[in-house]
Amino acid sequence: MTDVPEEGQQRRTFFKIGMAAIGGLIGLAMAIPLVGFAISPAFRKASKKWVDLGIADLLKGSRYKKINYTFSAKDGWVETNKRRSVYVTDQGDGTFQVYSRVCSHLGCLVRWDEGKDQFFCPCHGAVFDSAGNVVAGPPPRPMDKLPVKVEDGILYVKES
């Protein structure tokens, strides 16, 4: 004698499995957007923005002038004010060249030595010429030249 479940039992089991599957699908459909909302800022690339360095006419004739600036940056969910500094030099033809102060070796801040006409990094003795090229020391590449533009008389640098 075999124990055959009654038709009502089979129907209940079918409905239990069906309701569990539907509930799981609904839960999954709700969880995917919530998880995406929670973690997406961590994977979003920060947008590069133009930062005001000052009035271009006041910077004319400048030679490797250090400019400090502050800008707002969003990192994931947190928006903070960051401080940076760059060296600005007038090319003499109405254009400007802007160099990052961050050494390409280990990220120390370089300084301009007017007497030697070169940049010097105090961390490991790196030396860069006036065009940002490596002259001595361990840096693997030249100094970073940042994109610049002049609009309505204001000099802007693209912050990365």
Image: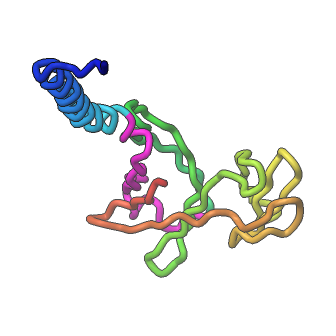
Say above or below: 132 vs 102. below
Indicate yes or no whether the magenta region holds residue 102.
no
Residue 97 or residue 64, whichever sits in front: 97
In the image, residue 152 lies at what x, y percent?
Answer: 26, 65
Can you give x and y, in whole percent of width and height, for residue 44 in the image?
Answer: 39, 47
Q: Residue at x 18, y 30 (%)?
A: 18
Image point 77% across, 55% down: which residue? 105
Q: Is residue 104 left or right of residue 135?
A: left
**Is residue 73 positioned above or below 14 on the image?**
below
The residue at the far bottom in this view is 93
Query: Residue 124, image x and y in percent?
Result: 88, 49
Q: Residue 91 versus residue 124: which sits nearer the camera?
A: 124
Figure check: 49 above or below 42: below
Q: Quadrant of residue 114?
A: bottom right
Q: Quadrant of residue 153?
A: bottom left
Range of residues picked out in magenta: 39-63
Q: Does residue 147 appear left or right of residue 138 in this picture?
A: left
Of residue 63 and residue 147, the one placed in the foreground of this image is 147
Q: Would residue 49 be counted in the magenta stretch? A: yes
